[in-house]
């Protein structure tokens, strides 16, 4: 006799479609929606400025989040100060929402590690560039939270390419086994540098990878702030209530190069890029706000002016921050510098 022992399904959610038509009755408060819109605009303008700084030799390699601002903004908007973020490298919008200063973000991408010492956010982990390693850090943090009986959520983000790594599966397995308050959010932006999503995994969704670990998963339109709000809010409440981990796949599109060291026009077909632009999150939300009478061109103009001022001030601070002394490389490592390193220290001091 053959019996089915387990069956699973993965649901997808879309509330605000790409024509800005609203489906269902899920509500996000007006002031929350406006705050989300403001941060998406801030992130997009900041992103543009960061690329300009890199192109003029004033910043190192920078990973744009153009087109993916909704995912990271909604994450940052819903987390509270006690929750912990274990990010990868595309999470600028979340950082900004968490109080991390624009000049700190620039400083990190300018090669200055002091950018990781966030003045307003001491709990979050620094950016993790080794793909998927942040998922392991997140379950470590989640385990500590559970051990201390705290009511906090941990959010870790990862690209769809990163879900091919063992670290991702190991982290999900551990999170499920120990019922940890960890939320894995997959930014499925369709491209892992030049590898397209369809060549990355044979699964129909990335969300279903969670099923293998025993975690419930959902796939949402990652360009729709309402679906993101619904799924992430549920997952955060679940985590804080001690009801275990969640996995959310947010489908979007990388409307930019992988980083400033890449040229996506060499491998993303133009038609695909153009079609994706028609579904992007910022103009979709703007249209909805206008249709709801919450936004108009006058408000847009004054927001753009406010954002430009904020960003220019941060750039000024960044550009006018003197570089670290070369000796700083040894200064935070030891309480007392070992004798064997004294010569190197002296040499570095002479370089200053
Ligand atoms: C362990 C590891 N292997 C390889 C790389 C080089 N690398 C940097 S980004 C990237 C692609 C990541 O794509 P994805 O996970 O889809 O995230 P996205 O950049 O598209 O947001 C690779 C292979 C790395 N940083 N770490």
Image (tube, rainbow, N blue to C red):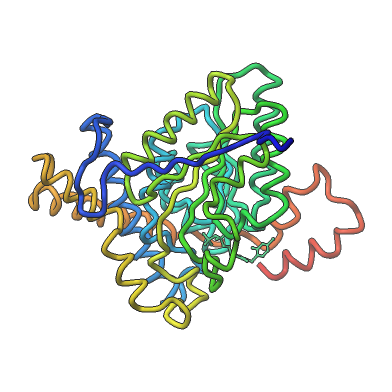
Q: Which one is in front, 287 or 110?
A: 287
| Of the pair 213 and 182, the residue shown nearer to us | 213
State which image quarter holds ligand 1: bottom right
Residue closer to the observer: 322 or 82: 82
Q: Is residue 189 above or below residue 152?
A: below
Total residue callouts: 0
Identified at 34% across, 65% down, the residue is 48
Left or right? Give the position of 162 relative to 259: right
List the single residue furthest toward the bottom: 266
In this rendered view, identify the residue nearer to me: 168 or 89.
168
Classify residue 15 as left or right of residue 100. Answer: left
Quarter of the image containing the C terminus? bottom right
| Residue 77 x, y percent position in the rendering | 38, 36
Place residue 194 in its image quadrant: bottom right
Residue lying farthest to the right in this orientation: 340
Residue that extends furthest to the top in the rendered view of this protein: 149
Q: Quadrant of residue 162?
A: bottom right
| Quadrant in which residue 19 is drawn | bottom left
Which residue is located at x 59 percent, y 64 percent? 200
Q: Where does residue 121 sit, x and y in percent of width and height?
A: 51, 37
7 left or right of 264?
Answer: right
Q: Residue at x 41, y 47 (%)?
A: 71
For image coordinates 60% across by 55% down, the residue present is: 113
Specify whether residue 47 is in view.
yes
Q: Position of residue 306 (x, y in %)?
A: 21, 50
Whether residue 122 is visible, yes or no, is no
Q: Position of residue 330 (x, y in %)?
A: 76, 55
């Amino acid at each position: 006799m053959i019996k089915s022992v387990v069956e699973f399904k993965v649901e997808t959610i879309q509330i605000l479609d790409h024509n800005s038509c609203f489906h269902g009755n899920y509500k996000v408060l007006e002031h929350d929606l406006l705050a989300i819109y403001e941060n998406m605009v801030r992130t997009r303008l900041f992103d543009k400025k960061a690329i300009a700084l890199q192109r003029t030799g004033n910043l190192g390699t920078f990973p744009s989040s153009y087109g993916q601002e909704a995912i990271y903004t909604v994450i940052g908007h819903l987390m509270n100060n006690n929750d912990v973020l274990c990010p990868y490298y595309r999470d600028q919008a979340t950082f900004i929402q968490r109080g991390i200063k624009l000049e700190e973000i620039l400083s990190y991408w300018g090669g200055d590690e002091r950018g990781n010492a966030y003045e307003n956010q001491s709990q979050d982990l620094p950016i993790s560039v080794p793909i998927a390693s942040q998922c392991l850090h997140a379950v470590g943090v989640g385990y500590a939270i559970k051990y201390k009986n705290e009511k906090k959520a941990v959010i870790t983000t990862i690209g769809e390419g990163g879900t091919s790594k063992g670290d991702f599966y190991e982290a999900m397995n551990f999170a499920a086994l120990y019922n940890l308050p960890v939320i894995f959010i997959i930014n499925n932006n369709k491209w892992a540098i030049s590898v397209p999503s369809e060549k990355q995994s044979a699964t129909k969704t990335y969300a279903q990878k969670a099923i293998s670990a025993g975690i419930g998963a959902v796939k949402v339109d990652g360009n729709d702030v309402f679906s993101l709000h619904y799924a992430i809010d549920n997952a955060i409440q679940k985590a804080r209530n001690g009801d275990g981990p969640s996995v959310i796949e947010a489908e979007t599109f990388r409307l930019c190069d992988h980083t400033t060291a890449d040229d996506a026009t060499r491998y993303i077909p133009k038609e695909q890029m153009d079609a994706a632009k028609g579904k992007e999150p910022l103009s979709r939300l703007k249209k909805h706000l206008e249709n709801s009478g919450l936004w108009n061109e006058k408000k847009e103009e004054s927001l753009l002016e406010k954002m430009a001022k904020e960003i220019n001030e941060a750039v000024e601070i960044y550009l006018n921050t003197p570089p670290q002394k070369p000796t700083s490389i040894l200064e935070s490592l030891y309480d007392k510098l070992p004798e064997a390193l004294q010569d190197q220290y002296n040499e570095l001091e002479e370089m200053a």
